[in-house]
């Protein structure tokens, strides 16, 4: 704490002591009470005035005996003041212990904290207004007290007065009044603290206008002034400037000053310099904006959660869109709601470790569940983050679902392809345009006796039997198929690894293999067929004995297509019996006969010349099903005739593998290029073998520019350790162990990308390679940098917060305290602070902590609890505590966490504000203490009294005469008193100060109460007083007013009804109202006089049948009271027959 700040605290403490002393010894009556009127404090003046001991008063609701109506009125005003946070004035009549009646005028104000929240307590200032002279003496003494405080306070006090008063109400032109008031306001009085705040002298500021202080334009000052006028009492923070030109922020409480006519004459204010506070708040808002902008606009889903409760505290737009929950739904969730049940045990264990080591950064894979039930694979990058005084972590989520799906599909496709590729019994070769072998299946290895590695990279020449093949013809076929896509079939003599020579039929087609055009060759060993042909040439007689044992399907037909002979393999292949097949032609087992006839005739013409032909064909079974076959034709002799020998092989499976191969290739290429991550296929030296389209498009390059170049060619200089990267590539290549690293990629246009690379070993074109899957994490890295800055900033703010932050155990052991808390209590370091015994060294009331701990354990949190504590030097400060219980995942208590704010200075300001407000409002209300008395209404009664008193003084008379005049004098005084009471009541009604308190009740009970009282008067005159009242007359009405009306009407009926007359009181419901009537058999009223009885300007009074007096105001008051209820009072009368007075009350009157 700086010397300057320490001095402020000490001086404010002195000011508080002075102010408390002034309150305790003030001549003003001062008390504090709750909303329910329970008294919590009284000063010495209250004790003396009411002759009470404060310990007997604290906790009770009333200082002394007051009427029920006053109690109800005070409770209602307290309730309204608590709801609206407004002050109010009222005068209360008290009957003291000596039976003396005193009138106290109270000004009551709700107490609020620095955030404007009601503290459930009022402070009231009272002055005895029973005696005018004594009242003025009190005002004088109070002014001396306030003047002393005005001078010594560290808060800036000022008074501004206008040259002309203004009206400020809904009936005036507020715009004109505002401008007039603003222009005419001048500073007339300030204290030393005010001058210190502005670095000014008194002669420099007195006479200045508000515009001389505000930094902003003219309209800014007008707006501030209008707020003050509208509120009458308001707290504002304004942007102003000191006299040295520096800007400062001022927090001020303004009060309007009004004259006796309720016109505004000026302002009174109490202010303090809050520049440091406002600058800190603005800095916080700016940093919060930077963090929030980065948070909300990040493309990755992000949320912040409480590490202890796992509640989601904040969530960005990307998370809302990706997971399908609304923001409000997210903020009601916990982490478990987003995880699959099978991950709960792992989640609990992870959270447990994080609560111990909250600051660790983690990168983990999880399964999450979206709102629609979809389960997704995610990668979570997390770190700790202080958030709204809670232990929190922030999660950045990357959805891996699509990437894993594509990887899985690639793997399945590759496995499916390999399975089919190797399941074919024929030999299959994949060759480039030059005939070089790229891959072979198991059938090729079995056919030649070589393994796959011995094939790869060589041409068919090394498989050719010397001198047996036209190799030029073979190359021409490959070139023709590669360039045109035409299918070629030829015979090839092969040389096995063991030196054995054998014949085979070869069919070649063009296809795709890992993105490039290739030749796929399918070869079948035809040794058996060749042996059969040789056998035919040498031993036709033995043909039939082995014909049916031949593994290939064979048909012998003439050159017109008629089938002459077939072996059993044909029967299995086509579904015909041998007898059936000899009765049909080649056309019957071929699809699309018309086309086949034309083609077959051309083929047979070539065969007839001795040419051997191989070609593909679409055959048709007996059941009509078609299938693919490969046919070899050659001319031979059968029974001395030229015939065609047709060797037929079902190539359906071969066709299927060719189709699968092409589909797999296309699928692989599609998947390979659809992945948004970068894919590099590398050899052991880090040379790029292939890349996907994402690499090409993002780096703005071509495949030719990147393939066959080292991965270092796209590395950002000085940002990658290439030797380490190459070691990782070699390690993965030789051990098949995955590796990870970060890699900076250089784009062609000079841009840089930070990527996260995962290395895995695989096969590519049957060669071992390393696949590098790289993900662009540039945004993520930037975001993490921003998070680090935000975390650093928030941590700094946490450490430099102006309020104290703590964690402690139930027994008071301090686990953590920020610097502000350590300094607040006057300690030098946390090491010193943590060793104190909280209950013994802090608490003034040793039982108070136990009470708060019990309440905290019950409610789980405390909000805004205020109490006094000792500092290290045993000085006392007032603090406001907000705290809560922190539990672990098992629901067990871990520690108490909370904040302590030193509100000592704020309490001083609060008390100063209340007292200043009382002073100002008392000044304004000085001339309102008495009602206006209408002189001519009192003159006549006084003349009579003066006459009687003169007779008593001047005339000699005997005792009986004196008694006569004394009775007349007494009656005159009673009449005068009744007149004054009525005049005062009427005046209160007219000025709107008579409180109107409607409440729901049964009118029947109030009518009966009045009848019980009035019955005694009726009995004295021998008048029969009866009533007929319905039971349920429930409505809302002011009991005092309606009881007054009933008493007046029944009293008048008794007064003007002769002895032995009758009066009836009736009450009943009629539609939406209640009707009450008072009917008498009295003297009645003339039509002319009926017009006068409700008018004050034409007073009408007369005496009763027994000479009873009247004031003439009773019915006028009745009419005013009924009008308050939005109802009416009327009369029907006939001279010498009686009168009926009636009034109504609405059933639905709102309270």
Image (cartoon, rainbow, N blue to C red):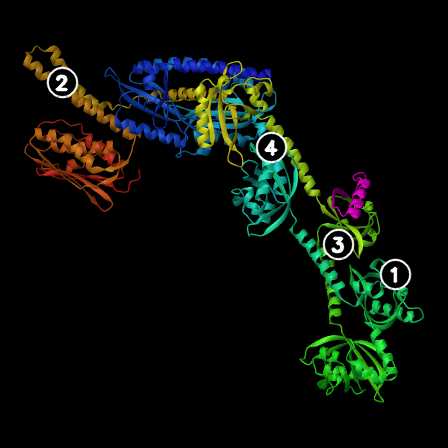
Image quadrant assignment for residue 975:
top left
Left or right, 536 with reference to 155: right
Q: Which mark is residue 458?
A: 1
Disc 3, SS: helix
Q: CA distance from mark 3 to mark 2?
A: 119 Å
For this orientation, the residue located farthest to the bottom is 640
Label 3: how many Cα within 10 Å (few below 14, some 14–19, many 20+): many
Quadrant housing the N terminus:
top right
According to the picture, the residue beneath numbered tag 3 turns out to be 693
Region of the chain picked out in magenta, as a range = 715-744
Q: Which is nearer the N-term, disc 2 or disc 4?
A: 4
Left or right, 973 with reference to 288: left
Identify the residue at image location x=13%, y=36%.
1085
Label 4: how many Cα within 10 Å (few below 14, some 14–19, many 20+): few
Residue 1065 pos. (x, y %)? 14, 38
According to the picture, the residue beneath numbered tag 2 turns out to be 969
Q: Examine the structure image and report whether residue 603 is included in the region drawn in magenta.
A: no
Q: CA distance from mark 1 to mark 2?
A: 148 Å
């Amino acid at each position: 704490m700086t010397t300057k700040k320490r001095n402020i605290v000490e001086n404010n403490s002195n000011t508080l002591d002075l102010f408390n002393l002034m309150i305790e010894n003030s001549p003003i009556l001062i008390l504090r009470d709750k909303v329910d009127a329970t008294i919590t404090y009284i000063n010495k003046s209250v004790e003396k005035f009411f002759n009470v001991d404060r310990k007997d008063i604290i906790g009770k609701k009333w200082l002394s005996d007051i009427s029920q109506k006053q109690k109800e009125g005070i409770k209602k005003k307290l309730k309204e003041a608590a709801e609206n946070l407004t002050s109010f004035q009222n005068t209360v009549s008290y009957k003291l212990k000596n039976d003396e009646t005193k009138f106290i005028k109270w000004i009551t104000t709700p107490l609020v904290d620095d955030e404007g929240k009601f503290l459930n307590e009022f402070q009231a200032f009272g002055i005895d207004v029973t005696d005018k002279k004594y009242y003025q003496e009190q005002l004088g003494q109070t002014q001396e007290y306030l003047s002393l405080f005005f001078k010594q306070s560290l808060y800036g006090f000022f008074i501004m007065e206008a040259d002309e008063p203004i009206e400020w109400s809904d009936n005036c032109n507020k715009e004109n009044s505002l401008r007039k008031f603003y222009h005419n306001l001048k500073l007339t009085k300030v204290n030393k603290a005010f001058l210190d705040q502005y670095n000014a002298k008194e002669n420099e500021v007195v006479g200045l206008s508000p515009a001389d202080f505000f930094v902003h334009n003219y309209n800014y000052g007008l707006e501030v002034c209008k707020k003050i006028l509208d509120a009458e009492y308001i707290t504002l923070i304004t942007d102003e400037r000191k006299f040295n030109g520096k800007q400062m922020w001022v927090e001020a409480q303004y009060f309007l000053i009004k004259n006796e006519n309720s016109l505004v004459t000026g302002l009174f204010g109490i202010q303090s310099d809050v520049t440091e506070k406002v600058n800190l708040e603005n800095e916080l808002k700016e940093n919060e904006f930077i963090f929030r902008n980065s948070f909300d606009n990040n493309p990755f889903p992000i949320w912040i959660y409480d590490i202890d409760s796992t509640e989601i505290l904040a969530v960005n737009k990307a998370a809302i869109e990706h997971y399908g929950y609304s923001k409000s739904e997210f903020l009601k969730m916990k982490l478990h709601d987003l995880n699959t049940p099978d991950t709960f045990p792992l989640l609990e264990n992870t959270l447990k470790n994080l609560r111990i080591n909250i600051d660790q950064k983690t990168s983990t894979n999880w399964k999450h569940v979206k709102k629609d039930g979809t389960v997704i694979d995610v990668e979570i990058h997390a770190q700790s983050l202080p958030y709204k005084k809670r232990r929190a972590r922030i999660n950045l989520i990357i959805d891996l679902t699509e990437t894993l799906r594509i990887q899985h599909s690639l793997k399945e496709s590759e496995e499916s392809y390999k399975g089919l590729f190797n399941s074919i019994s024929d030999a299959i070769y994949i060759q480039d345009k030059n005939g070089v072998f790229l891959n072979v299946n198991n059938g090729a290895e079995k056919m030649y006796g070589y393994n796959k590695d011995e094939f790869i990279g060589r041409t068919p020449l090394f498989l050719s039997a010397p001198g047996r093949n036209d190799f030029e013809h073979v190359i021409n076929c490959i070139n023709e198929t590669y360039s045109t896509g035409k299918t070629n079939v030829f015979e090839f003599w092969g040389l096995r690894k063991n030196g054995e020579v054998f014949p085979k039929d070869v069919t070649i087609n063009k296809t795709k293999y890992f993105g490039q055009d290739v030749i796929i060759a399918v070869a079948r060993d035809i040794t058996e067929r060749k042996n059969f042909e040789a056998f035919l040439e040498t031993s036709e007689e033995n043909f039939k004995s082995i014909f049916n044992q031949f593994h290939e399907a064979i048909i012998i037909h003439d050159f017109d297509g008629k089938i002459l002979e077939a072996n059993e393999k044909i029967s299995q292949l086509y579904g015909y019996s041998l007898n059936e097949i000899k009765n049909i032609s080649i056309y019957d087992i071929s699809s699309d006969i018309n086309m086949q006839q034309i083609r077959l005739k051309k083929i047979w013409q070539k065969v007839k010349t001795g040419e051997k032909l191989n070609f593909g064909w679409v055959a048709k079974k007996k059941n009509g099903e078609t299938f693919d076959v490969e046919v070899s034709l050659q001319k031979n002799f059968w029974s001395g005739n030229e015939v065609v020998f047709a060797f037929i092989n079902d190539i359906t499976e071969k066709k299927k593998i060719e189709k699968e191969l092409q589909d797999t290739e296309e699928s692989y290429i599609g998947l390979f290029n659809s992945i948004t991550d970068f894919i590099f296929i590398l050899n052991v030296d880090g040379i790029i073998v292939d890349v996907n389209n994402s690499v090409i498009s993002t780096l703005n390059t071509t495949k030719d520019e990147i393939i066959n170049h080292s991965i270092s060619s796209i590395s950002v200089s000085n940002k990658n350790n290439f030797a380490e990267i190459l070691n990782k590539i070699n390690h993965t290549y030789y051990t098949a162990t995955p590796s990870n690293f970060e890699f900076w990629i250089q784009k062609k246009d000079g841009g840089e990308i930070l990527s996260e690379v995962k290395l895995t070993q695989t096969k590519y074109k049957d060669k071992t390679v390393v696949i590098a899957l790289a993900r662009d994490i540039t945004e993520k890295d930037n975001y993490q940098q921003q998070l680090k800055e935000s975390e650093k900033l928030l941590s700094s703010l946490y450490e430099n917060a102006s309020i104290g932050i703590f964690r402690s155990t139930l027994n008071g052991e301090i686990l953590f305290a920020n610097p502000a808390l350590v300094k607040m209590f006057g300690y030098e370091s946390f090491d010193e602070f943590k060793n104190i015994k909280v209950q013994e060294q802090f608490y003034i009331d040793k039982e108070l902590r136990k009470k708060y701990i019990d309440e905290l354990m019950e409610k789980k949190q405390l909000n805004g609890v205020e109490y006094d504590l000792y500092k290290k030097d045993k000085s006392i400060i007032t603090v406001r505590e907000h705290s809560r219980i922190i539990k672990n995942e098992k629901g067990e208590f871990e520690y108490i966490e909370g904040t302590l704010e030193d509100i000592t200075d704020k309490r001083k300001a609060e008390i100063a504000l209340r007292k200043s407000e009382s002073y100002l409002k008392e000044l304004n209300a000085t001339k309102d203490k008495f009602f206006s008395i209408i002189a001519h209404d009192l003159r006549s009664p006084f003349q009579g009294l003066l006459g009687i008193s003169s007779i008593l003084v001047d005339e000699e008379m005997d005792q009986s005469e004196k008694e006569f005049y004394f009775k007349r004098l007494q009656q005159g005084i009673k009449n005068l008193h009744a007149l004054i009471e009525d005049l005062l009541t009427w005046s209160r009604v007219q000025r709107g100060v008579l409180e109107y308190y409607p409440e729901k009740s049964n009118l029947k009970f109030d009518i009966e109460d009045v009848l019980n009282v009035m019955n005694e008067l009726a009995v004295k005159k021998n008048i029969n007083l009866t009533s007929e009242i319905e039971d349920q007359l429930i409505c809302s009405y002011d009991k005092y007013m309606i009881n007054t009306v009933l008493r007046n009407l029944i009293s008048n009926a008794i007064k003007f009804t002769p002895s032995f007359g009758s009066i009836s009181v009736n009450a009943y419901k009629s539609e939406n109202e209640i009707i009450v009537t008072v009917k008498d058999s009295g003297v009645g009223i003339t039509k002319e006089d009926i017009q006068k009885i409700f008018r004050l300007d034409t007073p009408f009074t007369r005496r009763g049948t027994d000479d009873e007096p009247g004031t003439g105001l009773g019915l006028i008051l009745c009419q005013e009271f009924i009008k308050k209820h939005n109802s009416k009072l009327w009369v029907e009368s006939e001279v010498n027959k009686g009168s009926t007075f009636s009034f109504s009350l609405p059933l639905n009157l709102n309270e």
